[in-house]
Image (cartoon, coloured by chain):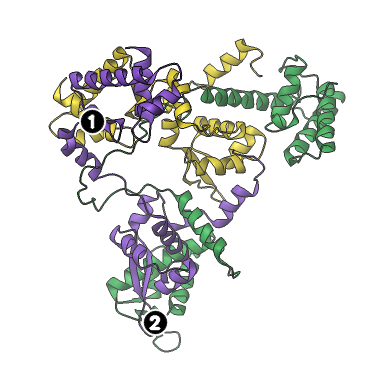
Chain colours: A green, B yellow, C purple
Amino acid sequence: MNYEIKLDIFEGPLDLLLYLIRKNEIDIYNIPIALITEQYLEYLDIMRSLNLDLAGEYLVLAATLIHIKSRLLLPPVEGEEEGEEGEDPRTELVRQLLEYQTFKEAALSLEGRPLLDRDVFTRGAPAEEPAAEEQEEDAMIEVGVFELVQAFREIVSRLDHSEDMAIDTEKMSLTDRINEIMERLTEAKELSFSDLLGERTDRKRIIYTFLAILELMKLRVVRAYQLGPFGVIRLFLAVEG
Amino acid sequence: MKEKTTILEALIFASEIPLTPDRAAEIMPDTEKREIVTLLGELVRQYEVRGGGICLAEVAGGYQFRTRQDLAPWIRKLKAARPAMLSPAALETLAVIAYRQPLVKSEIDRIRGVDASGALKGLLEKKLVRIVGRKDVPGKPIIYGTTKKFLEVFNLKDLSELPTLRELKDLQNDGGEQQE
Amino acid sequence: MKEKTTILEALIFASEIPLTPDRAAEIMPDTEKREIVTLLGELVRQYEVRGGGICLAEVAGGYQFRTRQDLAPWIRKLKAARPAMLSPAALETLAVIAYRQPLVKSEIDRIRGVDASGALKGLLEKKLVRIVGRKDVPGKPIIYGTTKKFLEVFNLKDLSELPTLRELKDLQNDGGEQQE
C-alpha cells in the first residue's frame, strides 16, 4: 500500500473511511468489509507509529468494522434475531457515511460562497459620526450568553486562590428562588414559609425554597422567627430596602 | 435620483450592519415599508447596471454595500493581510449546525463521528454560532444555532438561500470524484 | 465604467483610511500615478452628477466615500438607537453578578480585583442589574442581583439556563482542532 497520504487531513474516522472507499473505487452501498477493515486498521497503525494523537472515535469505528465483519462471516442463525433477518449489518454504517458525506458536501458549498473579508468587503472606514445625540436608554445589548460565561471564566482563571467558583445549574435554580423570595418579601414585608411555597408544592420547590431561606439568613438579609415550638415560621427582611 | 432613494442609499452606507427595510421604515416614518422595499430593489438594479466597484448586496435580511467579488485580489493587496480561514473541522461543524439547527452538541458529534468541542468553541468565539437555549431533556444540554453574522459572512439573504441537502446529495451522485 | 476606475472605487470603499493616489499606485503597478489622479477626478465628478446619498470626498490628501452632508439628520436617526455594546468591564461585572448573585459590591470588587462602581452604575441604568436588598451588617451594604430584563436580553428562560463553567470547559478541553 502506498502511504504517502497526509494523515492529518482526516477530520475523523468517518472521513478516513470515506477516503478508503473512494481510493478503492468501491460502491458505498456494497462495501467489502474485510478489505476496508484491513486497510482501516493499517492506517491506524501508521497513525500510531507516527505518534499522531489518535482520537478514541477512531478505535470505536475500528471495533464497529470488526463487529460487522464477524457478523457477515457467521451463517444466519435460525430463529435468532428474527426481526433483523435479512438486514445487512452494514446498513447503519452506510447510512452514517452517506449522512456525513452530505454534510461534507455542505461544508464545501459553504466555503464556495463569496465570503466576507475574503471575496467581498464592506466599507473600510468607520462611518463618520454626526454630532451624537443622547443614546436611547433601552438600547439593545449585543452580547450573548457565551460571551457572558466566558467573561466569568476569565475572571475566575485570574483568581489565584483556589476558591471554589464552580457554578452548577442547581445553584442557579437556587438563585432564581432567592430572587423570587426577595421580591415577594419586599412587597409583603412578612411572609410564612407556606406563603412562599404557594400552590406548587413539589419536592424540588420545597427543597429550593428552604435552601434559599437558609442562604438569605446566612447572608443576613432575612430574619426568621418562630412563634413557639412547632409554630409558623415567619420571615422578615432584616433591613428595609 | 429620487430624494427617498438618496436617503436610503446614505442610510445603507452609514449603517454598521445590513440595513433592514423595517429599520429603514422606522427612520423614515413618512414612507411605507412596501415603498422602501421597491426603492431598495431599484437601487440594487441601478448598481448592477452601473457595473462599478461596489454592489448592493442583500444579506442577513438587509442591504449592505460590498465590493464586487471579482475585485477581491485588489482589495486583498490593499489590506495586505491573509483573510482568516475556517478550518475544515470548523466548516463541517458549521454546516451541520446550519442545516440541522437548533441542535445539541451530541448530535453534531454523532454526524461528524468525532468530538466537535474545539470547532464549536471557535465558532462561538467567531460569533458564527450562538447558544440558543437548553433542551428540556435530562442533563439539559445546550442548543446551538447560527447567528446573523453567519448570514453576513456567507453572503446569505436568509437560511433558505442555502442549497438543500437533497440538492447537495444529487451533486454527490453525479459529481463522482469531488475530493482533492 | 472603465476597469481601472472600478478597481479604484472598490479600493477607496474598502480602505480604512482615505486612499491616497500614491497608495493606489502601489497597489496598481501597471497604472501611473498621473493616470490615477485623472481617474479619481472623474470619479468624484461622476458621483457629483449622480447626486445620490454618497459622495466621494477629498480628505487628508486622499479620497473617501462619505454620506452627503445634508442627509446628516437621517444618519443621526439611524445611529440614535444603535445596539449598545457592553464594555469589557461591564460585561465582567455582569458576569460576576449573574453567577454569584445575590452579592454585595465589595464581593464584586474582590472577585474582579478592581472597583466596580462605574460598571455597576451603568448596569443599573441599563436595568440589567437591580438592588435586591440590604445586608444586615454594619454599613448595611446593598445586595445586587440580575433583572428580568437581563433574562430577556440574554434570551434565558431562567438563571439555571446560564451555561456553567464546566460546560464551557468541556468545549475547550479538546483543543486538538486548530482553528487557525
The quadrant of the rendering that contains the N terminus of chain A is top right
Residue C129, relative to residue C80: is it above or below?
below
Q: Nearer the viewer, residue B104 or B44?
A: B44
The image shows residue B49 at horizontal and vertical percentages of: 29, 12
Q: Nearer the viewer, residue B71 or C124?
A: B71
B105 vs C11, left or right, is: right
Name the secondary structure under disc 1. Answer: helix
Q: Nearer the viewer, residue C175 or A34?
A: C175
Q: Which residue is mark 1?
A: B10
Q: Are marks 2 and 1 in contact (CB under 8 Å)?
A: no
Q: Residue at x 82, y 38 (%)?
A: A48
Q: Residues within 10 Å of mark 2 (few under 14, many from 20)?
A: some
The image shows residue B154 at horizontal and vertical percentages of: 46, 28
* Foreground disc of the pair 2, 1: 1
B113 vs A109, left or right, is: right
The quadrant of the rendering that contains the C terminus of chain A is bottom left
B99 vs C149, left or right, is: right
B18 vs A151, left or right, is: left
The image shows residue C131 at horizontal and vertical percentages of: 33, 69
The image shows residue A118 at horizontal and vertical percentages of: 48, 28
**Amino acid type, mark 1:** Ala
Residue B69 in sight in this render: yes
Q: Check chain identity for marks 2 and 1: say if they share one.
A: no
Q: Which mark is residue A223?
A: 2
**Amino acid type, mark 2:** Arg
Residue B95, relative to residue B169: is it above or below?
below
Disc 1: host chain = B
